[in-house]
Image (cartoon, coloured by chain):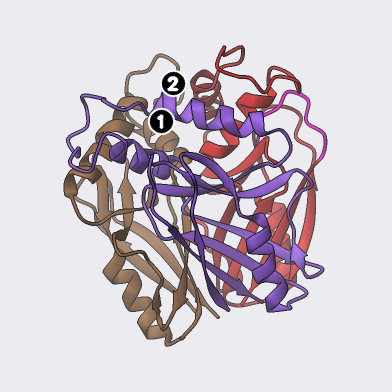
Chain colours: A brown, B purple, C red
Amino acid sequence: MVRRLSVSPPGPGLHEITAQVARVVADAGLREGLCTVFVQHTSASLTIQENADPAARRDLERWLARLVPRDDPLYTHTTEGPDDMPAHIRAALTATSVSIPIADGRLALGTWQGIYLWEHRDRASERQLSIHVGP
Amino acid sequence: MVRRLSVSPPGPGLHEITAQVARVVADAGLREGLCTVFVQHTSASLTIQENADPAARRDLERWLARLVPRDDPLYTHTTEGPDDMPAHIRAALTATSVSIPIADGRLALGTWQGIYLWEHRDRASERQLSIHVGP
Amino acid sequence: MVRRLSVSPPGPGLHEITAQVARVVADAGLREGLCTVFVQHTSASLTIQENADPAARRDLERWLARLVPRDDPLYTHTTEGPDDMPAHIRAALTATSVSIPIADGRLALGTWQGIYLWEHRDRASERQLSIHVGP
């Protein structure tokens, strides 16, 4: 089963999508299986991270922004704005797809794990994800 | 088929789990398929790396420890110890899930590839993995 | 269904393999499903990146080459040449497997997404990939 999911992140950083993905898994009605989340963009990505302290997510965003700064003289791909090439690099360093087993009819996430869309651009349009659930 | 696997890494670095994953694949008895390994933590991750020279794995650990140092004034999520926020960042830069095709009844790994749990914390408790094998 | 794919990248950087992967998906003849691409090496990796401006791909290669330089005194695994340990690190930071849903019989890639083999060594031999397509 494949379902589309649209997400509108308010700005750069980690935006939780666990509930939306869990709903797709519930709809599939499988007791065991595999759920794969895929983001159809190259300037946003996915990560599975701590869902407890929001400071951890903010630190992740700030650390990555520092590692991949704007206005780096290395960049030659600059026509789409100063946040575009850093966004591609940030996406390459994180994940475009994540796969999570399904056990007892639910995502087999750890207690403190959430699924996040990691937005890398300042003013992102709506982001499209594709979710596959299989046996 | 979904199976749980518990691993107790002695400390930070890459700890091979290829044999345990291969056993799950053998139990599944599929000639062709896909095996997905998922780690249920956000301060440990997965990687597929060279299984020959242990120096390569030690260099990976040392390089990542240098890229993501402790005691970075950027961190605000510090309540869980100086190795916790670096562990989250290290996990975000590596993989929470890896998927390996199954061909001729076995993991289609390259000759020099091994599957590793990458522990990022100093004193990790037992780590839980979920392994899915599908057709 | 599992198929092998051999690719001979001319040198370091991103080499598109979207058409070859799409052909495997077309052969499978599934309307919905999941396609997983796996690279059987630890000094080459995979990424899904922008397929429009080649400058974006060149910047990705140059940025990663700068982050993971050669002749780093940290390296102790040096017997396979100065580009070998950087290649392992670059592979660990990017992806060994990517999974893409199949919808309407085709890879559910975004408009600007292409699948790339990221070669990390100077003189790579032929690279082997394993592609799984399942329901």
In magenta, the rendered stretch is C118-126
Q: Which residue has dot 1 on it?
A: A85
Q: Earlier in the sequence, mark 2 or mark 1?
A: 2
- When the figure is inspected, residue C125 is found, relative to residue C3, above or below; the finding is above
The main secondary structure of the magenta stretch is: loop
Q: Count residues near mark 2 (Cα–Cα under 10 Å), then give few for <14, some for 14-19, many for 20+.
A: some
For residue C48: magenta?
no
Q: Nearer the viewer, residue B57 or C106?
A: B57
Q: In 3D space, how far apart are the residues under numbered discs 2 and 1 (Cα atoms)?
A: 7 Å
Q: Position of residue B73 (x, y in %)?
A: 21, 24
| Local secondary structure at mark 1 | helix
Q: Is residue C57 visible?
A: no
How many numbered markers are drawn? 2
Q: Residue at image x 52%, y 34%? A: C53
Q: Position of residue C3 (x, y in %)?
A: 78, 62
The C terminus of chain C is located in which quarter? Answer: bottom right
Q: Residue at image x 32%, y 55%? A: A116
The subunit letter for the residue under badge 1 reads A
Which amino acid lies under the numbered mark 1 shown in the image of this protein?
Met
- Left or right: where A58 falls relative to C30: left
The answer to whether the residue labelled 2 contacts the one labelled 1, judged by CB atoms less than 8 Å apart, is: yes
Q: Which residue has dot 2 on it?
A: A75
- Left or right: where C125 falls relative to B114: right
The subunit letter for the residue under badge 2 reads A
Which amino acid lies under the numbered mark 2 shown in the image of this protein?
Tyr
Q: Position of residue C134 (x, y in %)?
A: 64, 73
